Amino acid sequence: MNLIIPQGMGHSGLKAAFTTRSGGVSEHPFDSLNLGLSTNDSPENVIENRQRVATELGFHVDSLAIAGQIHGSQVLLVREGGLFAGYDGLVTDRRNVLLCISAADCAAVLLWDPKNGVLGACHAGWRGAVGGVIGNTIETMNSCGADADRMHAYVSPCLGVDNFEVGEEVAAQFPSDWVARRSEWPKPHVDLSGYIRQQLTHKGISDRQVEVSDRCSMGEMDIFFSHRGEKGITGRMMGMIGRTE
C-alpha cells in the first residue's frame, strides 16, 4: 500500500496519511484503493479498502470519522467514528478516532496540536477554501484547547495551478495573488494550494509548520484519482489523521 505520510509525524501515537490509488481491491476505473462509497464502485470493495487502510494505520475500521462533504464550510467536533453528513471539517480531542476527508482533486488539510492532542481535518476545494472551512476548523480546534501557534498542518496533493482552469466568476473569488494568467491559457488558473497555505498562516500557524504537497492529482493520474482528469468516473482518496496514545 502506497501511503503518503506527512513530515513531522514523530509525535507519540499520532498517525496521518494521504492515500493513493494503489493497494486495494477495486477494479477499473476505480482501481484499486477507492475509498469512496459515493462512487459506482462495489460497496464491498470500498469497505474492504477502508478496512485495509485503517489496519495499516493501526485503527479499527469502526473508528473512521468520515466527513459527508458538500463543498461547504461547516465543522463538527466528533468523538466517535461514523459518517457526518453535511460537514466539510471534523475535529476531535479523543484517541482512537481517525478523521477522514475524501478527495479527488480538492485538497485534504490535516492539522494537529502536538501538545494537547487536538486534531482537525477539512476538505478544501475552491468553494470551501474561499468559504472559510480552514479558519472554521482551526477555530473549532482552539475551542478544544488547541493553539494555532503550536499547530502543524499538511495540505495534500490536489489540482495544481497548471491544471486548475476556472471561469472568471471563480477567479474573482480569489485574491489576485493566487490567480495565474498566461497567453497560452484561454482562461485563468487558480493556485489552490498556495491560497490554502496563506489561509493557514493568516490564522496563526507558523509557515515552518505547514507542509504543502507540490504534487498534482490530475498531472499524476497513475498515482492519484482525479475527478476532472477522469471526467467524474473515478475513485476517491482520503486524508486521514488520528492518535492511538
Image: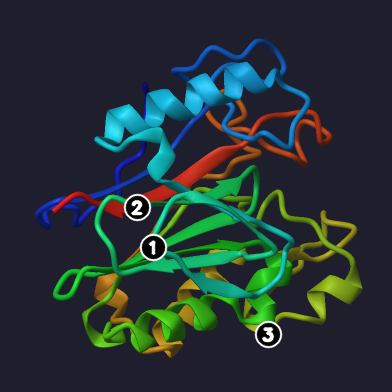
Question: Which residue bears the numbered disc 3?
Answer: 175
Q: Which of 106 and 24 is in front in this view?
A: 24
Whether the residues at callouts 2 and 1 have beta carbons within 8 Å, the answer is yes
Foreground pick, 76 / 125: 76
Question: Judging from the image, what secondary structure is the residue with disc 2 in?
Answer: loop
* Alpha-carbon span between mark 3 and mark 1: 36 Å
Labels 3 & 2 near each other (Cβ < 8 A) = no
Sooner in the amino-acid sequence: mark 2 or mark 1 = 1
Q: Is residue 167 visible?
A: yes
Q: Viewed as shown, does residue 37 lie left or right of 58?
A: right
Badge 3 element = loop
Quarter where residue 18 is shown: top left
**Image-based side of 47 in relation to 87, left or right:** left
Q: Mark 1 points at which residue?
A: 79
Which residue lies at the image location 69% right of the left edge and 12% below the top edge?
Answer: 28
Question: How many other residues sit within 10 Å of disc 2, few (<14), some (14-19) or many (≥20)?
Answer: many
Where's residue 5, x and y in %? 30, 43
Give the alpha-carbon distance from disc 3 to disc 2, as whole Å.
36 Å
Looking at the rendered structure, the kind of residue marked 2 is Val
Q: Which quarter of the figure has residue 67?
A: bottom right
Q: Residue 243 carries which label?
A: none
Quarter of the image with the N terminus is top left
In the rendered image, residue 27, in percent from the top left (x then y), is placed at 65, 10
> What amino acid is found at the position of numbered circle 3 in the picture?
Pro
**Quadrant for the C terminus in the image:** bottom left
Which percent across, then down, holds residue 86? 70, 64
Residue type, mark 1 in image: Arg
Which badge, 3 or 2, comes first in the chain's sequence? 2
Q: Residue at x 42, y 39 (%)?
A: 62
In the rendered image, the vertical position of residue 2 relative to residue 139, given as above or below: above
Q: Earlier in the sequence, mark 3 or mark 1?
A: 1
